[in-house]
Structure formats: C-alpha cells, structure tokens
Image (cartoon, helix red, strand yellow):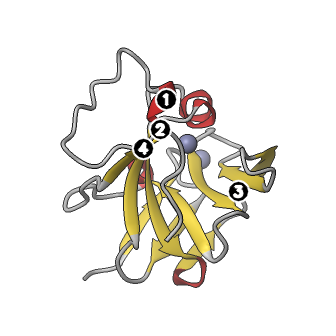
Amino acid sequence: MADLAGGCLCGAIRYQVSGEPAMVAACHCKSCQKQTGTAYSVLLGVPADSVKIQGTPKTYTESGTSGMPVDRKFCGDCGSPILSDAKAFDGLLFIKGGTLDDTSGISVGAEIWCDSKAEWSALDSEVPKFPANPPAG
Ligand SMILES: [Zn+2]
Ligand SMILES: [Zn+2]
C-alpha cells in the first residue's frame, strides 16, 4: 500500500506514514470532541516508528482514563490536531484522519467511546462499537 501523507491546515506541520494503519477507529471521547471541535475523531493507529514528522508540533498533555498521559500534538500556528501519543498504547501513534491529504481508501473499523457520542453525530456505521476503549488484544 502507498505511504500516507498529510499535514495541518497551514502546512507548517507535515507527516508521512510508511505502510498501512494497524487500525482505524472513530473516537467519540470528550477529549477528541473538545480538541477537534466536532463530533468525533477518526484515528489511524500506526506504528510509531513508521511516522516521520516535519515541523515542530506543540504538545498538550492530558491524563488519560487509564491514568497514563496522552500527548496531543497540534500545529501551534493554525491549531490543527495532528496526532495523539497515548502512553497506554505503547508503540502506536494515533493520526487524526482528517489531516490526510487524501482520505480515500480509509474506512472506519470500529467506533470507540460511544458512551459520550454526540446526539448530533452523523456517523451511523455498521462497525463494532465500544462504550470506551476497545478491549486489549
Ligand atoms: Zn498549521
Ligand atoms: Zn478520543
């Protein structure tokens, strides 16, 4: 599969991912809603060592539900959220799907954190749904 490429709205931050995402999930958690300003994030879980970033994103660190930190990286110039580094998911980075240059060929495989799904979320998929994080393994 071709490499994935994307970046923020203003172009100060660019990234490339070699290979395919390990998983693609729509995340309805409250933090994703706040960070993106809309109903949910589409997250591409990719191996951390497959990601190359140009530019220097800012980092906002919050405490995840597991108690482990989540580094939310975003463009300090235009505000686009780029990716999350959740320490509870060692070795994976979660790219915000909307920042891809080409979003075709990406399909959501699960919906997570459905307990906080917005009533006005237009997403009504047939994929597995989880109230919070998917079960490990
Ligand atoms: Zn930017
Ligand atoms: Zn989330």
Looking at the rendering, the quadrant in which ligand 2 lies is: top right
Counting residues from the start of the chain, the first of labels 1 and 3 encountered is: 3
Counting residues from the start of the chain, the first of labels 2 and 1 encountered is: 1
Counting residues from the start of the chain, the first of labels 4 and 3 encountered is: 3
Is the CB of mark 2 within 8 Å of ligand 2?
A: no
The label number, if any, that marks residue 131 in the structure image? 2
Residue designated by label 1: 115
Quadrant of the image occupied by residue 39: top left
Quadrant of the image occupied by residue 118: top left
Give the CA separation, mark 2 to mark 4: 4 Å
Secondary structure category for the residue under label 1: helix
Question: Which residue is found at the position 44% from the left and 26% from the top?
Answer: 117
**Residues under numbered marks 2 and 4 in contact, where contact means CB atoms less than 8 Å apart:** yes
Quadrant of the image occupied by residue 101: bottom left
Please identify, in this view, whether the residue under mark 4 or under mark 3 is nearer the observer.
Answer: 4
Amino acid bearing label 1: Asp
Residue 3 x/y as whole percent:
35, 79
Amino acid bearing label 2: Pro
Residue 36, above or below 90:
above
Residue designated by label 4: 130
Amino acid bearing label 4: Phe
